[in-house]
Image (cartoon, rainbow, N blue to C red):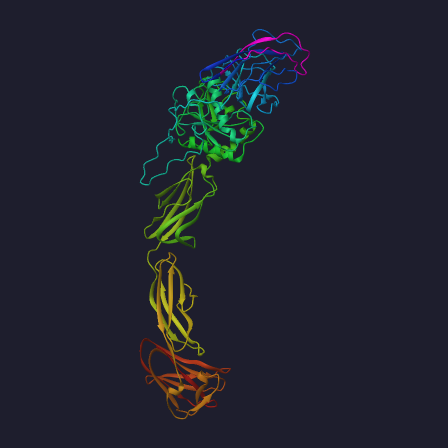
Amino acid sequence: MALRRIRPTLFRIPGTGPTSDGTVSLGRSTSTTGGHVHRNRTKLLAASGLLAVLAGTGGVPAGAVDREPARAEVAPALQTVDLAVGSSRPPAGRGYGWLLPMIKPFSLIGVTWENPRETVDGVVQVRTRAAGSGRWTGWQTLETDGRAPGDSRGASDPLWVGASDGVEARMTGGRPPAGLRVDLINPDAPTPILESAATGRRAVTGRQAPKAKIALPARPVPRMVTRAGWRANEAIVKGTPEYTGPTQVFFVHHTATGNGYSCSQSASIVRGIQAYQVRSRGWDDIGYNFLVDKCGTVFEGRGGGVGRTVLGAHTMGFNADASSIAVIGNYGGVRVTPRVRTVIAAVAAYKLGAYGNAPNGRVVLTSGGGNRYALGRKATLWRIAGHRDAGLTACPGNALYAQLPNIRAVAGGAPAGLHVLRIGGTALAARRYFTRGLIQPAWTTTTPTVLINRFEVWVDGVLRVATPNSRRSSVPFRLTPGSHDVTVRALHLSGRSSSVSSRVIVDPDAPVFAAKPALALRPGTVSSRAVPLRMRWDVRDAVSMGSVTLTGPLTINLGNTARSRDVAAPPNRATQFTVRAVDRAGNANSASVTRAPWVVSEVSARRTGSWRALRNGGYLGGTAVGGSVRGASASWTFSGTSAALVFSKGPRAGRVGVFVDGRPQGMVDLRSASSAPRQVAWSRSWPDSGSHTVRVVVEGTRGRPGVALDGLVYLK
């Protein structure tokens, strides 16, 4: 990197008092691009305990002098500006400014110091200049309460500032630690392509799934951006991943990098954090196991395998047997969204539940040595704990820390709202499902998919189907005849489960007609378009009848318990009647009967005695015969299964005797309250078709001797 020597220029910091001499040498500014190191001399501005440094290529605060523009050059991955002050102390009430070396663009800033065990007594603040617009931000405080065993230098948490090309830093309330410097990270600097041992490794679960006859879906890995996806710099990773024991605790952090970012910048922020923690703090890799931005996108953190127990560098004294997630931003006064809460809960349940540890429980751990728990001291922690629970820090911020109880409840709860929507291939009746054998349960749950491990379907205590967490129905499978308990079970990533059971009846057999449909003539009015009939049948099902329906010549619901129905058919032509029975499982059976009701005129009867012709539009064909003399008779011979005599009824109608095949059938009284022509006054049926003779004899009833005979109807 070509250097340009700059003559320091003094300026007044507003409100700090008059300028004077007293400038202190600061050491060197260093930048690295790959293996190249760039060093520049800097100066210190001191005023009443205020340490201020200005760097950049233009747009300096008021009072500074413009400098020459730098030549276009690729910004390095890391630039450092030493702020060491030696033994000099700033004069009281004095303020000094100077022109620092040109700074290449950067997006993330932090301060580090020589001794990682030393703490910063004062408050360190920075402000930066946006690249392009030249606008300066307000002063922002860096969090300096974090510490990790792998630190080669003391360090603040990094702050995301976006694309910037100038910086000022100040410290109040204490003396700067030795070796204090500003570290500027450019996460978009070109990096060599290097695949580490962790790259491309498939995620595996923390424990082997038990062997079963039914194949269990792989334990789902929460959806996340892989290291390759956020372009982790594998070239700076030191050594190979280390592994620890089963995950006992899951720590929640915030990165304290600020909230003024868009989610499209999240990957760049993660790259910046990796570069800062490796290049500035001396770690092997990024310290967190996972990160999540404010939009709920999860990023794979330290390499080694998402499903494995990778040893991270996140919580001093408790990195062993632990995992962690850091929410990108500062959550001291801002709560995370419900989506982010759910995602944190899902990742925590994924890591803890893999080893049977309840995410909403507690655990006793032994400290490996830290600023809150000394080496060997026992600590009782929530399984999902905040960073502050194990260390003297404000992390993960008051607002996020207050949300941890809700996150524990979500991560450790059983699946909620589980119920069966339907069971394909069945019919539901009286809270029982009926099927012919092949079923396909479908269900729903109010628990988000990211928190579900899998779903299972059990039949009579035996696992039959297991499905991934994204599915809400099983593959079809067949049951044996009989009654079964079918249970849908939802398994949470935490290991807890919920179940809902249903009674399923398998009925492979169709209803059986004990008596097929049969037709007979019945009382009623005969017309030129309809003859009254009665249909009888007997159909039964061994399990449960669903419906019995007349499907022809018209559709009528006959009911499940009825055994007869009054119907009608047009005269002098054949009509088919079909009954269809369906049981609750969907098995169906049909039976039919076909008959033709023939109307035979009274004129064609063989008559004896005295009869007279009657004409009226109310009679069949407009004619009938009347008889009033005792002993007058009329007879018909036919072949069929049913016969009926048609008379006109009325207040003064008399009685007739009926004979079938020479045998008396009794007297039929034709009197009625009102006149009713074309009435079936008598009928008779036989189980089989045969030849029969029906004869009527006039009684000559006293006071009402007359009768009007309108013919005979028989079924053929």
Which residue is rendered at x = 43% and y = 35% of the image?
Answer: 493
Asked whether the viewer can see residue 316, the reply is no
As drawn, 432 above or below 277:
below
Q: Position of residue 489 (x, y in %)?
A: 40, 42
Q: Position of residue 569 (x, y in %)?
A: 41, 74
Q: Is residue 474 left or right of residue 53?
A: left
Asked whether the viewer can see residue 5, the reply is yes
Magenta segment boundaries in residue numbering? 4-31
Which residue is rendered at x = 40% and y = 66% of the image?
Answer: 551
Q: Is residue 179 left or right of residue 351?
A: right
Q: Position of residue 430 (x, y in %)?
A: 43, 55
As drawn, 166 above or below 20:
below
Q: To which quarter of the image does residue 313 belong?
A: top left
As drawn, 337 above or below 509:
above
Which residue ends up furthest to the top in the rendered image? 87
Residue 465 covered by magenta stretch: no
How many numbered circles does the render carry? 0
Question: Which is nearer the eye, 662 or 702?
Answer: 662
Q: Position of residue 134 (x, y in %)?
A: 60, 23
Magenta: main secondary structure: loop
Image quadrant where one finds the C terminus? bottom left
Question: Which is nearer the eye, 71 or 703?
Answer: 71
Question: Which is nearer the eye, 83 or 631?
Answer: 83
Residue 10 covered by magenta stretch: yes
